[in-house]
Amino acid sequence: MDKKIIHLVIVLIVALVLLVVLVSMRPQGEKPIGGDKDEHGCLIAAGYSWCEPKQKCLRTWEEPCEEGNACTDSGGTIEKAMCCKSAGDFPNLCLIGACGCGPADSHEVDICNCGEGKCWDGEACVVMVNSFGECVAAGYPVMESYPRQCRTPDGRTFIEEVAICEDRCGDGFCDDMVCLGEGCPCAETPESCPEDCAGEETCGEMSISEAIDIATNSDCTADGSLLDTHFCNENTRTWWIDLDIEQPGCAPACVINVDTGEAEINWRCTGLIAP
């Protein structure tokens, strides 16, 4: 065999042996430069580190890890949930309520589950507020308006319910007084109570509600009650309101004089008694 070929074979063999030796000397588990990862799989060389509260790798200059700490520090737990695409991580659940849209319009985000009776307001877990009383109990400021108002830090306003008044609409009276306490008559207007106040019948200068009020407080109702039927006699300027009084052969009515305000019973008896 030619000596040059023999020398070339020897050189190749030596080079192969050296390559095998170098590979065998490389430490086990060594990763390529730029691909080092920590125990959580975060790419160290790229600036990623493990965020325990958010349970993921992140670069702190791109996404702070502290937001998750605020959740856990205030008693919440970090969970994954499907929210509307417009929502980012840790949305204000006190403000938006249940987080979710249709499947096509949702994506997965981190949320803070504060547990029963509490919600995440964007900064911490706070007592859930759904009424004026709960707002006051939570210590939020109360505005001394009428009715009073209480405002939460996220901008929601709750108005105190005023005392419940008695609704007398439809009783024939137009109660235009202001309600000053629980159980008193509600203020009635032609708009709110057309049965009593809108287009009310008058006889001269006296309305039917005034006539009913006079009749109710007179001797007309000593032995009976007023009926719903009535009419105005424009010639005599009197209101006639039928009475529920049993009197054979008679159809009694309470007659109210528009000018004097006096009321008396007119028995309107025919003298005929039904057999």
Image (cartoon, rainbow, N blue to C red):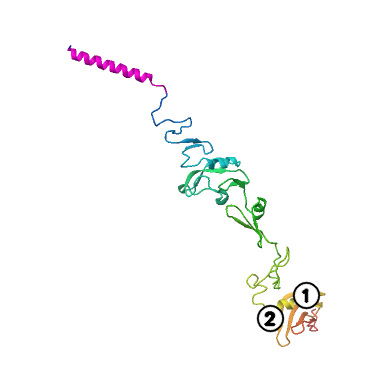
Residue 30: x and y in percent read 41, 25
Q: Amino acid at mark 1?
A: Thr
Please name the residue that numbered disc 2 is placed on.
Answer: 202
Q: Amino acid at mark 2?
A: Thr
Q: Who comes first in sequence, dot 2 or dot 1?
A: 2
Nearer-the-camera pick, 256 or 225? 256
Residue 140: x and y in percent read 64, 52
Asked if residue 251 shows in the view, the reply is no
Residue 216 image label: 1
With respect to residue 68, does 252 lie above or below?
below
Q: Residue at x 73, y 81 (%)?
A: 239
| Secondary structure mostly taken by the magenta-highlighted segment of the chain | helix
Identify the image quadrant of residue 171. Answer: bottom right
Q: Secondary structure at mark 1?
A: helix
Determine whether label 2 and label 1 are within 8 Å by CB. no
Identify the image quadrant of residue 182. Answer: bottom right
What is the number of callouts on the image?
2
